[in-house]
Image (cartoon, rainbow, N blue to C red):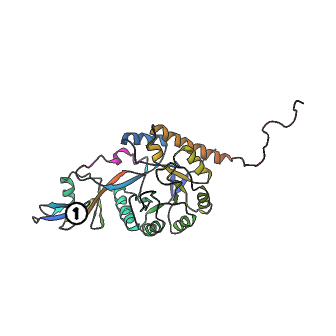
Amino acid sequence: MDRKIEITVNGEKLALASEVRLGDFMEQRGLPPSSVVERNGQVIPKDRRHLVILRDGDVLEIVRLVGGG
Amino acid sequence: MSIKALTIAGKKLRSRLFLGTGKFSSPEIMARALEASGAEVVTVALRRVELDNPQDDILSHIDRAKYLLLPNTSGARDANEAVRIARLAREASGINWLKLEVTPEPNYLLPDPVETLRAAETLVKEGFVVLPYINADPILAKRLQDIGCAAVMPLGAPIGTGRGVKTADQIRIIVEQATVPVVVDAGLGLPSHVCQSFELGADAVLVNTAVAVAKDPVAMAQAFRLAVEASLQSIAAGPMEESEKASASSPLTGFLR
């Protein structure tokens, strides 16, 4: 788990010091727990965040509900 | 005069006014407008979290015990994007209701009928309660109801224009053939537009901008609520028929001569 990786989050490339669990990544970044994640096109259920390990090249969309019509 | 409840996908709704939550100047004003509107169904959108600036959570301002969230797929430019947004919205909201909108063209935000139908087919199969936002096209509305959409949401005028029910003749036809509720969505700028929608036979209306950008959104929300009540009560009361010629309201006998 100490390999450097690069992932794409919401269109932005991010370098991470090592592979990391999605749940930990979100906590470290201060992302709201209510947000939801799509990883490589698949929705990650909220209760599986702590099982998923982010790998080099992963593409994430992290989204949340906002006001809208 | 009692007014029948509206039922969508087996869920009985107490209000026929759906309210959008976009464009409010603050979450507090939004919450007060929701309250004043009497709405039960409230729409929300899905957007990327800003990684450097994760903001306040809208859900902390919406009492889930009181309001039914209707997430939309705004921003989707084709069926594939709409389906992706829908799946994420279901995970974020915890409910499977969806306002399906596919608006590839930025100037008028008119819905793409082909992509909307394609997305609806997929989403209905995946168990979503799909309420598609459409142009007021009776054939499309019928196709969507035939594949299992829970309602249809024809526009009165383009989103956010406040121009009223410019599509009245088509909405009348949609209503005539509808086997699912018809919700007039988009373009309603004034309470009178709400009245017109119900007089055409709509089952519900969706309003957002007209309330959110009013000088006093809370008072405007209440005005819309009253318009809905007045419309429904007048329909239940059995309105008079129009006629070409005058018909005196005062007695036609005993004139002074």
Residue B61, percent from left and from top:
36, 44
Q: Is residue B14 visible?
A: no
Question: Is residue B26 rendered magenta in the image?
Answer: no
Q: Residue furthest top?
A: B256
User: Which quadrant of the rendered structure holds the N terminus of chain B?
Assistant: top right
Relative to B191, B257 lies left or right:
right
Q: For the point 57% across and 56% down, which residue is it?
A: B167
Which chain's residue wears label 1? Answer: A
Quarter occupied by residue B170: bottom right
Q: For the point 52% across and 40% down, which residue is it?
A: B223
Q: Residue furthest right?
A: B257
Determine whether B69 is above or below B105 in the image: above
Query: Between residues B185 and A37, which one lies in front from this camera angle?
Result: B185
Relative to B192, B46 lies left or right:
left
| Three-letter amino acid code of the residue under disc 1 | Thr
Residue B86, percent from left and from top:
38, 62
Q: Please rate how many residues cluster around mark 1, counting C-alpha atoms within 10 Å: few if below 14, some from 14 to 19, many from 20.
A: some
Determine which residue is flagged by label 1: A8
Q: Main secondary structure of the magenta part?
A: loop
Quarter occupied by residue B35: top left
User: Which quadrant of the rendered structure holds the C terminus of chain B?
Assistant: top right
**Range drawn in magenta:** B50-65
Residue B180, percent from left and from top:
55, 61
Residue A36, percent from left and from top:
30, 58
- Give the mark count: 1
Determine whether B120 is above or below B257 in the image: below
Quarter occupied by residue A4: bottom left
Determine whether B17 is above or below A40 in the image: above
Q: Is residue B201 visible?
A: yes
